[in-house]
Image (cartoon, grey):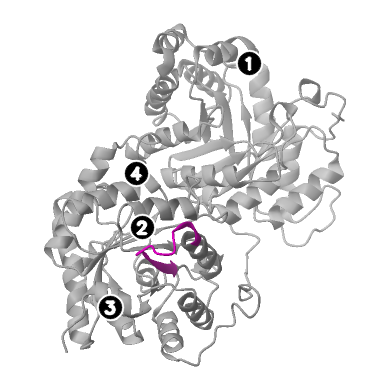
Amino acid sequence: MSKLSFRDRLAEGPLLADGAMGTYLHSRGVPPEACFDVLNLNDPALIFEVHHAYLDAGAELIETNTFGANRFKLADHGLLSQIADINRAGVEIARKAIEAAFKANRYVAASIGPLGVRLAPFGRVTTQQAQDAFREQISALVDANPDVLIFETFHDLLEIETAILAAREITDLPVIAQVTFSRDDRTLLGNTPGQVAETLAGLGVNVIGVNCSNGPAQAMRVVKAMQVALPGDSPVAFSSMPNAGWPEHVGGRVMYASGPDYFADYSAAFRDQGVSIIGGCCGTTPEHIAAMRAALDNPDYVSTIQSQGGPTAEPVEVVTSISVPSALARKLAAREFVVAVEVSPPRSAVPDKLLRAAQMLRESGADVIDVTDSPMARMRMSPWAACHLLERDAGVETVLHFPTRGRNLLRVQGDLLAAHALGIRNLFVVMGDPTRIGDYPEAADNYDIVPSGLVRLVKQSLNEGLDCAGNRIGPPTSFLVSCALNLNAPDPEQEIRVLRKKLDSGADYLLTQPVFDLDSLDRFMEHYESLYGPLETPVLIGVMPLYSPRHARFLHNEVPGITIPDTIMKRIDSAGEEAPQAGVEIAKELVGQIRDKAAGIYLMPQFSRYDLAAEIIEFIRGL
């Protein structure tokens, strides 16, 4: 019996794809920081074994191990010269696995993922540069003769459009185009499922779908929205390859909540919804695929999803250790160059924009997100709630700004215990802005404890399992505590005395105000060293991208501790409408000088221009 073409097989009914490659390789001992794609050359037997396991489980569509085999990602591993070899080998291994399995009507999908860089206007890579990179990878894949191209895990609609256009210049192979969505059912850049479906359908792709994302329940919502957005006579088919739920960190391992039975139930629901390609992404295994195969092959299998009135998730028991140090603590101890970025909580109860910004910053290379507490004494969402949402929904570590102003000692300790219970481990202790400058000048402005006292309370009481009164609180907390350092204080002697109190109380690291002239850093460090010897505590230097001449003058004239040199002021003045980009370039220059002088930077983007911050972070990671 001759093999059906992929298009003909697609028309016959649901086609079962395979599951995860990356998380499965990780479970087999491959470190997460390794280049998975080069295993096509260095350990083809392992990749063959993964493909064979999915084929034995009943998968009909096998994705190649080439998701990250583009010039930008491979350059990070020194593998630019092997782009073509890695991609061709990926297709060849998958083809050999199908031949060895003696399975009829099995298909090789050449996997193409995002470039791992930000495209203009949010990043530095032009559309033409991106298209060239995609063309390079796709050409190598096509040379090895796959059955279909699959573009997956894209969150930027412009980027996947660019990739598909590059493919159309090279081949007429069928195309599967899959996008990943945040928890609010939008892409990282805010596109809805309907917008995604309309755009991709306009490019003439064969299959539109969702992969990765949160889990089967979300994938079902997204696919339904995509189907509604397209006319009933649309020739486009749909696919769904979700993660096995949201990843949880349990006992030092990444665990996924959704088991094989849950995926089997959803595979039948997707079939009934008219989804043509059904598979899995991160966290799914051959066991998941085997369960899905059994459900799809059983004509009597009835999914419980619809009859229950909606999807339900299996309960997951998450075990957390109260004493595990934060990733930030480990990076500072290892003397890694840390990039922290300041954000402000929303002025409403809706955190979606903040979550998308944090995901963008994380993907650009930020280590932690610092969340402010009522900056300028203006009402915003509680920062420890925002921190919790960012860590849970955006997967990024946070630093909670914790002002002492406006809190009595009871509330201070209660709030800290609540923050720790929510998984927050990093604090920035500060006095806080006086309420008289904000929207509620009559609000209480009292405080029971100064920043150095709060550092002592956290480090010498709560972290020792005691409250301020010496009562046991159960297991000790494990907070990492930072505090402020003003390099341009009008009275440096007083600033150093206050600093010594903070250090004696146990401060772990320091954050400075924005610096535009590193002479101030050198002067302060020399002064401190003359009194107490070298300052050994890690310091993150404040970097604030200037946005306009007005912004620069306000900082220079009205914000204590900030001094902007004339040379920088003239550059911003002369930049005109390009002042924001000039501010970014100035920030990059400062970062280049800071790298040898400090433990990292504390980036403070203004006016919610987190895209400019992402550009600076990408510059840092490229150094």
Upstream in the sequence, badge 1 or badge 2?
A: 2
Give the magenta-colored segment's residue range: 228-241
Mark 1, residue position: 559
Q: Residue drawn 61% across and 76% down?
A: 314
Type of the residue with mark 1? Val
Pointer 2: what residue?
33
Amino acid at pointer 3: Arg
User: Residue 9 — which label?
Assistant: 3
Task: Identify residue type, mark 2.
Answer: Glu
Circle 3 residues within 10 Å: few <14, some 14–19, many ≥20? some
Q: Can residue 325 be seen in this view?
A: no
CA gap, disc 1 to disc 2?
42 Å
Name the residue rendered at 35%, 35% in the picture: 120
Q: Which of marks 1 and 4 is nearer the N terminus?
A: 4
N-terminal label among 4 and 3: 3
Is label 3 in a helix, a strand or a loop? helix
Query: Badge 4 local density, few (<14 within 10 Å), some, or many (20+)?
Result: some
Is 354 part of what is drawn in magenta? Answer: no
CA separation in Å, label 4 and label 3? 35 Å
Mark 3 vs 2, N-terminal side: 3
The quadrant the C terminus occupies is top left
Specify whether residue 240 is painted magenta. Answer: yes
Residue 193 is situated, as x and y percent measured from the top left of the image, at 48, 55
Q: Give the label on residue 117, or none.
A: 4
| SS under mark 2 | loop
Q: For numbered disc 4, what is the local secondary structure?
A: loop
Q: Distance between the residues labelled 4 and 2?
A: 17 Å
